[in-house]
Image (cartoon, grey):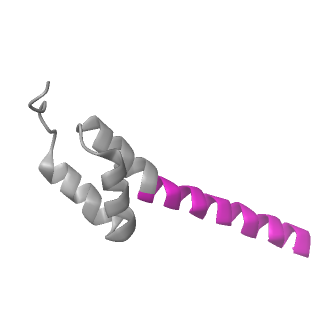
Amino acid sequence: MNNAADAAVIIGLSLVVLIGTVWLYIILPAQMARSRNRSVFGWILISLIVSPALSLLALLYLGRRGPGPDA
């Protein structure tokens, strides 16, 4: 392979890793929190600070939050 082809492969793989990381750390916890009536911003912060795996497991464990007192 030549240098241009190597560079294209490296750029392509880097984009895949970047998109996967953004999905794991931001998009997936946000979607799970929103579907469970929980704070999207708070769970994204937990995912970024602690771990995306722990935040996802916590969201699964906590389940759906019921309506609040003002509902």
Q: Nearer the viewer, residue 27 or 68?
A: 68
Residue 67 part of the magenta segment = no
Question: In which image quadrant can residue 12 be found?
Answer: bottom right
Question: In which image quadrant can residue 47 be found?
Answer: bottom left
Q: Is residue 2 in view from this perspective?
A: no
The answer to whether 67 appears left or right of 43 in the picture is left
The answer to whether 39 appears left or right of 22 in the picture is left
State how many labels appear.
0
Q: Main secondary structure of the magenta part?
A: helix
Give the answer, above or below, for where 54 lies relative to 67: below
The magenta region covers 1-25
Residue 38 placed where, x, y %? 24, 43
**Quarter occupied by the C terminus:** top left
Give the answer, above or below, for where 17 lies relative to 59: below
Q: Is residue 52 in view from this perspective?
A: yes
Q: Nearer the viewer, residue 40 or 1?
A: 40
Give the answer, above or below, for where 29 lies relative to 34: below
Q: Nearer the viewer, residue 53 or 26?
A: 26
Residue 19 placed where, x, y %? 57, 56
Residue 15 part of the magenta segment = yes
Name the residue at 31% across, 64% down.
53
Residue 62 placed where, x, y %? 13, 50
Residue 56 placed where, x, y %? 28, 56
Residue that lies at the very extreme toward the top in this rendered image = 71
Give the answer, above or below, for where 52 lies relative to 41: below
Name the residue at 15% across, 44% down.
63
**Quarter occupied by the N terminus:** bottom right
Name the residue at 51% across, 57% down.
22
Q: Nearer the viewer, residue 16 or 52?
A: 52
Residue that lies at the very extreme toward the left in this rendered image = 69
Name the residue at 31% across, 54% down.
43
The answer to whether 9 appears left or right of 52 in the picture is right
